[in-house]
Image (tube, helix red, strand yellow):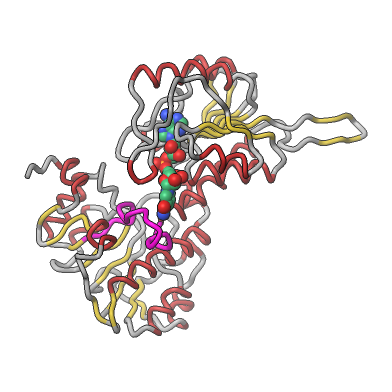
Amino acid sequence: MNVSVPKETAAGERRVALVPEVAGRLVQDGVEVTVESGAGAGAHHPDAAYEEAGAKTGDGFSGDVIVKVAPPSADEIGRLAAGSVLIGFLQPLTAAETVRALADRGVTSFAMEAIPRITRAQSMDALSSQATVSGYRAALIAAQELPRFFPMLTTAAGTVRPAKVLVLGAGVAGLQAIATARRLGAVVQAFDVRSAVKEQIESLGARFLELDMGLEDAEAAGGYARQLTDEEQQRQRELLAEEIGKMDAVISTAAVPGRRAPLLVTEQAVKNMSPGSVIVDLAAETGGNCELTEPGETVVKEDVIIAGPVNLAASMPDHASSLYARNVQSLLGLMVKEGELSLDFDDEVIAGACITRDGQIVHEGAKQAAGVTA
Ligand code: NAD
């Protein structure tokens, strides 16, 4: 059996799906690995490192299994053989055209985003591994853009008060942003609609921001947040606008899978902030948590610096790739028996992550997104 790794082609994508260390482990397990020349360059892995690990340099789309990071472009789908297996981020709930094209091509595809978030599959959870990277980077961007210190300083020239940072959404990225901002010495508060995270926020030395939203808990299936009603969202925005005005930096990470990011930071909230304050909107790609965010840009509006980074995990490609590669290795561990591909669709992880198979879209959410009716 052969696993192949193409060079990523999406703009700004510097990650690679397998790093040499993981490629070497697959080779030891009896799997042939073929890596496209230059595939690891963005993450600082030259072809020679893969070859030393026992992989070959060659066609990245030639494998029985092709492992990628970013969703495939139309051209890339054209290079996939019918009957091949594709593993990668496929955005099954939003990229309907990609999913349809994969089905039409006869590719058996598995989306890293669709791996069930159950204990057994934790080592395959690429959403978490990549969100860890983006949460960390978001806090660094906030510290970098803020024209003030994060930590409290006592100097001969006077005392500097610590920055006040508010993190909105305390999932994987938010918790990492909290931890990073705390390490830099900021005073951190955080808010989430899932009340279960209060304890996690506090264990990181931050304060849970209590908003009188009249909301019991908004946790839905799989540990995700449910979409709030229009009235709840309106109330949340009003209450937040006042709190945001007291902050030096806001890092927003709120998301609801498959939907536009909730709008939490209004233009009025931005106006309430003092000049020079910073907003880092990690939800920029899915519509933004802040009304004034411009995806992929850092803009100054109302004298507030608003950063809307996209694909932030790719900005730290070395560790992002090694974590991702381990997630992929772990998933392959379920798919490969004695060096041969063996897909057990009775396994809930394999079945849950499968998006297309035998020319059909088989994932419920992807079917809905693609408008496929039963
Ligand atoms: P996500 O990226 O979908 O969302 C980020 C955060 O935004 C979530 O914490 C969500 O509650 C929050 N949010 C949504 N709407 C909001 C609003 N209007 N205001 C404020 N916050 C809002 O989530 P994620 O980080 O991928 O995962 C969320 C949770 O899923 C985790 O914290 C965990 O509980 C669970 N999870 C479980 C496993 C596992 O069991 N293996 C693995 C990973 C995550």
Point out the quarter of the image occupied by ligand 1. top left
Q: What is the x, y in percent for residue 92?
A: 25, 48
| Quadrant for the C terminus in the image | top left
Q: Is residue 72 left or right of residue 309?
A: left
Q: Is residue 253 above or below residue 120?
A: above
Query: Measuring 42% from the left and 66% from the top, which residue is drawn there?
Result: 325
Q: Relative to the observer, which residue lies in front, 322 or 254?
A: 254
The magenta stretch is 109-125
Q: Quadrant of residue 293?
A: top left
| Quadrant for the N terminus in the image | bottom left
Q: In this view, does 6 lie above or below 244?
A: below
Q: What is the x, y in percent for residue 82?
A: 13, 66
Query: Measuring 61% from the left and 39% from the top, which residue is drawn there?
Result: 202
Q: Quadrant of residue 3?
A: bottom left
Q: What is the x, y in percent for residue 189?
A: 61, 32
Is residue 351 at all visible to an observer of this figure? yes
Q: Does the magenta stretch include residue 110?
A: yes
Query: Measuring 63% from the left and 45% from the top, which residue is drawn there?
Result: 180
Q: Quadrant of residue 349?
A: bottom left
Query: Measuring 17% from the left and 57% from the top, which residue is drawn there?
Result: 356
